[in-house]
Image (cartoon, helix red, strand yellow):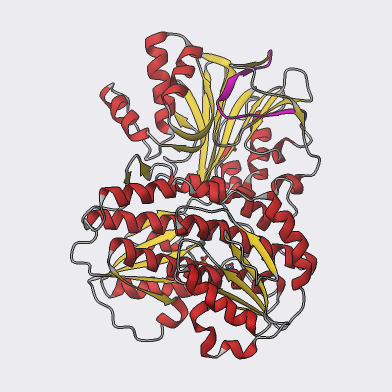
Amino acid sequence: MCGIVGYIGNKKTQDVLLNGLKDLEYRGYDSAGIALLEQDNIEVCKAVGKVDNLRNELKKINNKNYKIGIGHTRWATHGKPTYENAHPHLGEYSYVVHNGIIENYKQIKEELLKDGHIFISQTDTEVIVHLFENYNNKLNNIKEAFKKTIKKLKGAYSILLITKEHKNKIFFFKSGSPLIVAKGKEKGEVLFSSTDSPLIGLSNDVVYLEDEVGGIASSKGIEFFNDNYKWSTLPTSKESAQKDGFDFFMEKEIYEQSDVSNDCMIGRLQDDEILFDEIDSNILEDINEIKLCACGTSYHAALASSYLFERLSKIRTSVEIASEFRYKKPLLSKQTLFIVVSQSGETADSLEALKMAKKEGLKTLVICNANNSSMTRLANISILARAGIEKGVASTKAFSTQTIVLWMISLYFAKIKNNISKEKLAEEIQTLRQVPKALIVNNTIHEKIKRLSKRYLHGHGFFFIGRDIFFPLALEGALKLKEISYLHAEGYPAGEMKHGPIALVDSELFTIALMPQNLLYDKIKSNVEELSARDSTICTISPLNFDLSDDFIKTQKAKHYMLEFFEMLVVLQLLSLEIAIRLKNDVDMPRNLAKSVTVE
Ligand code: AGP
């Protein structure tokens, strides 16, 4: 996720901004830059890669003592990680940094191009500074120009803007992406940051800006455009700040899923259609099959999406585990679209599978959370999951955003092939829009899971069972538990239990049963009854009461099984988290595991 910093004061502005950007590194990025303002001189310095590259570049510009500046670390969502795409972005006399996504940037850019504005980047951000100057050139009123700019923008964003027209001011606005404004400890000092970590030690009084709040800051004070703000105090620990107050990155990332699921849909859901700038509408010409390939959690997202590709796009779909695929001498056809799913974009087995498909001349598409990774550089088409950096080794928000993106692609393909009615497409899009709500952690359920987790710290193992698309979800739940609790768990198709696994059943064998109301409920119910009859200890996750449960986690009734899918995902993630916490395991860095498996 991008990071923003800003500073007004008498310290060496370059150093304050650089230190702030260093503190934001944990959010993940692929380029960085700062803009500095002093009288008539507006300086910018940018670098691809790490903040230290930026520090080296800064040594090349004059080391004046600037009094005002803005800085940014960029996690690319539009356009590759290049110098031109790095922030800050310049108009004629102003610089802007931005976190988030401007949904209507294409339309704005077209209008500005007609007005003679020249763009050098592929980013959505650059339209902000040109729009601002376009208004100011006409209005000759900086504040009104800024307000009109904000009014025109659609999407989720936070913005800092400096301009030679008002040398000692920083214009700021927050709408959907976090932004904090802080009073420095020295008189007249003002600081900005995306999170509180960079501010710790430099300020005590901060405003965590609410949506649709902005204003103008200078050494004389901070003017807010409305009174929907309140001053509060900062946490004292940087580490706790980077975890937003959670004990573990994994827990923070489970709670982030609702927000990042919004990000991954912005600009891709438009009224009643799905948009993917990255995918040409002729992508399916002479394609009659889809083959997905991945490892681990990404494999589970791929497997889940295979149900959607067949059900919605009506394209024959198969799924491969990458480490198996690469040695099985697969029969490949150029009429197959090869889709690799990967959070890191560096997993050795998945990367090798991608190379094999490319070598055979297949069209390749990668769903990835890391722009500029080996896979995004290699695939014909790259679609970013936009989950933001995922620090927890046990993947959570990457899985939910991958599944959402794949679901949107299945609908995009269904539309291309005319395999979906207008009404069905509208219903699916309407359901997609409700996913962020389904991913909100229900605190009552979280508290219940904390309590009931004490009962699952022993036994001779777990079966996670589900049917249809809930089978890949069961696999994911089992993997989460294995990874961080070190307890044995298997995901199984519920209908398979009687073909052998049921021999393991007794009261010490725990069954976690996914029982959605909207998909094969009666079938899963009878499977669970078989297990209960053999005295398995059963925890059911369902919107419907089930009296044979030993433990029961009641989820919300929903109109569509995919909303149940995402709500149950959160329950499974929290269950593994709370069991691992009770076992005092290292939740974020479990034994024997790496975040990215770049070796075979
Ligand atoms: C997920 O919790 C695991 N850490 C692991 O299975 C991971 O999903 C797998 O290694 C694939 O990684 P990738 O998504 O970066 O390719």
Magenta-colored stretch includes residue 40: no
Q: Is 358 situated left or right of 448 in this image? A: left
**Could you tell me residue 393's position as x and y percent?**
63, 64
| Up/down of 284 relative to 531, above or below | above
**Nearer the observer, 487 or 334:** 487
Q: Is 399 situated left or right of 306 in this image? A: right
Outermost residue toward the left in this view: 286
Quarter of the image where one finds residue 504: bottom right
| Up/down of 515 relative to 555, above or below | below
Outermost residue toward the front in this view: 547
**Residue at the (73%, 44%) spot, across then down:** 241
**Could you tell me residue 593's position as x and y percent?**
64, 72
Q: Is 412 situated left or right of 45 in this image? A: left
Q: Is 579 situated left or right of 342 in this image? A: right
**Could you tell me residue 120's position as x and y percent?**
36, 35
Name the quarter showing ligand 1: bottom right
Q: Is residue 521 visible?
A: yes
**Nearer the observer, 105 or 292:** 292
Quarter of the image where one finds residue 123: top left
**The magenta stretch spans which residues?**
203-220
Q: Is residue 599 visible?
A: no
Number of numbered labels in the structure image:
0
**Residue at the (51%, 62%) spot, across then down:** 344
| Up/down of 445 relative to 237, above or below | below
**Could you tell me residue 127's position as x and y percent?**
39, 30
**Nearer the observer, 420 or 138:** 420
Q: Main secondary structure of the magenta part?
A: strand
